[in-house]
Image (spheres, helix red, strand yellow):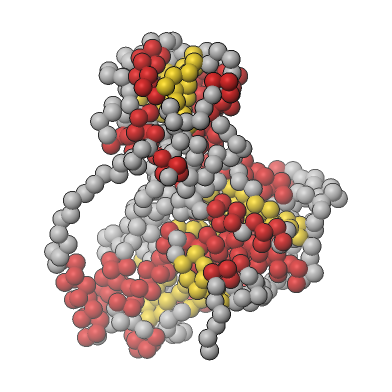
Amino acid sequence: MQQDVSLADRYDLSKKQVLLNGTQALVRMMLMQSARDRAAGHRTAGYVTGYRGSPLGAVDFQMTRAAAELENAQVRFQEGLNEDLAATALWGSQQAELRGEGKFEGVFGLWYGKGPGVDRSGDVFRHANMAGTSPLGGVVAALGDDHTGESSTTLHQSEWTMIDSFMPVLSPAGVQEVMDYGLFGFALSRFAGVWAGLKCIKDTIEVTSVVNGDPLRLDFVTPEFDMPEGGLNIRLIDTPQAQEARVIDHKRRAVQAFARANRMDKRVLGQAGAKIGFVAAGKNWLDLAHAMQVLGMDQGAAVRHGVTTYKVAMTWPLDMQSFAEWAEGLDCIVVVEEKRKLIEGQIKEALFNQKGSWRVFGSKDAQGALLFADSYALDPMVIAQKLGQILMAEGCGSARLKGALERIDAAQTANNAPTLASRVPYFCSGCPHSSSTKIPEGSRAYSGIGCHYMVQWMDRETLGFTQMGGEGANWIGESLFSTRAHVFQNIGDGTYNHSGIQAIRAALAAGTTMTYKILFNDAVAMTGGQNNDGGLDAARIVQEMRGIGVKHLAVVYDEKEDISAADFPAGTQMHPRAQLNTVQEAFRQLPGVSVIVYVQTCAAEKR
């Protein structure tokens, strides 16, 4: 039967089968939650806020493009100035009806941020999670993780920040589960009074799939649970001591009870009575499924060899009761997870003092040798090879399995990938940073977060960086113990707007001698070319720098820019781009903090 299919279906809730990528799934998830609440007779609203960053760099684009659909569903999208302030705004949304002044019965919220933004928001997460969520609100935090450091200065894993704040973590294995686990997260958040983390990495969010977008497809069960007096949700009058008691004594158990009642974790291959079990979640579940396919381990083979697999949805806290039921009778359990091991330790805790004898492997194998490393990422072929070796050692050495291992070994030893010429990433043609990052001979500069990070790979005496917003603060400390009297510090306008202005204030307060070059290219170029939040322009930067006490300040601009001295505070030094070196040579002789605002529009956005 031929279907009438359109890309416009992605946000049409009357259409069930739709084509979505992972970020679009977050948009539809908000629309679906609104529809679910309306169907249940609840008058709620939604709120989305956060800060972009790969692999969630397009969330603001997709939310903005769906403005009409979101407005019709009473969902408000608002970019955050940075991640922790956005999280604080969401915390506020959960308080809207506490004083009897709320427009709605509750506000369900979505926060989004890259791994480093998760780290900087830890204080807010802790406070907000301890305070709780609205009974008809709830918060899901989309955690943009970069396990391999492809677009980040760190290789990050957000789960441990969540655990530190006692926030449960859901790990979807694809676009369908981004929506499904997100809706589960809202229901869990309301029941247990917690914020719920939703792990998003490129393998599961930067993909496109046909999914079932029926908002009423899932039906969540509310478990029987012995609630403390007053429940677990946010309350108007509270104390830190009472909040801690609820989080530690009740919320974790409530989260596990909710997961148990809804059976989120599932046996996939094999059956009860198996002897060997493999466990994984999220992206690593996809890796495990691929590895099992390579090994020829389908349902029939799994039953014959006494093998079973277990797919974990919530990686923390683990639904230990359901896991123990699956593990009954197993001799050997192998946990496939990359980065710092999270599930393995919980499995050992779940089985401790249980009747039975299990061998649990993950980080190390039976001989104590490395099995799955804590660093970088896992590869399905390596997983297949190691699981195959374990199966052989456990007596599952069929001809089919041996043949699969031989093919894997042959593929890994074959030198069939010729060495290719490598090219270091460079600025786009016409990029303003190509000119702005040049410094006078004999000077030294620091890089920072943004496209100008790449200057470190060029011959420009620029090396070193900090976390986003810390640009130049490292020199505050280094300068006290260095023979060098002055450095330049590059900082992009997006970083300045996000948090970097505080670093400049810190350098001023410390009396540090340095020159900040604020690179105003009129776009947050690295994450998609968005405009700066709040309408930041070069003139306002100059005004702010004057306001915090910078005495030595100049604007250097590209002649093709539509710029007028009249837009800037009276007395502002204005110089064409050709004079950048002259200005820098003068500023490096000055004591204290000086600032050069370099104005040239991002070439990619201009095109």
Looking at the figure, which quarter contains the C terminus? top left
Q: Name, please, the residue furthest toward the right.
A: 100
Residue 435 vertical position relative to residue 353 in the rendered view, above or below: above
Front residue (pair 116, 129) = 116
Q: Position of residue 397 (x, y in %)?
A: 24, 82
The x, y position of residue 79, in whole percent, is: 61, 46
Residue 469 higher or lower than 582, as above or below: below
State whether residue 153 is above or below residue 439: below
**Residue plotted at (27% across, 60% down):** 369
Report the side of 4 relative to 109 (left or right).
Answer: left
Give the camera-side residue of 460 and 409.
460
User: Residue, x 66% and y 64% (percent of image)?
Assistant: 31
Q: Quadrant of residue 403?
A: bottom left
Query: Residue 134 location, x and y as percent?
Result: 74, 56
Seen at 72% across and 49% down, the residue is 93
Image vertical order of residue 486 relative to residue 363, above or below: above
Front residue of 6/89: it is: 6
**Residue 265, visible in the rendered structure:** no
- Total number of numbered labels? 0
Which image quadrant for residue 29? bottom right
What residue sits 45% from the left and 42% below the top?
606
| Spot occupied by residue 407 in the image (x, y as percentages of width and height) | 20, 76
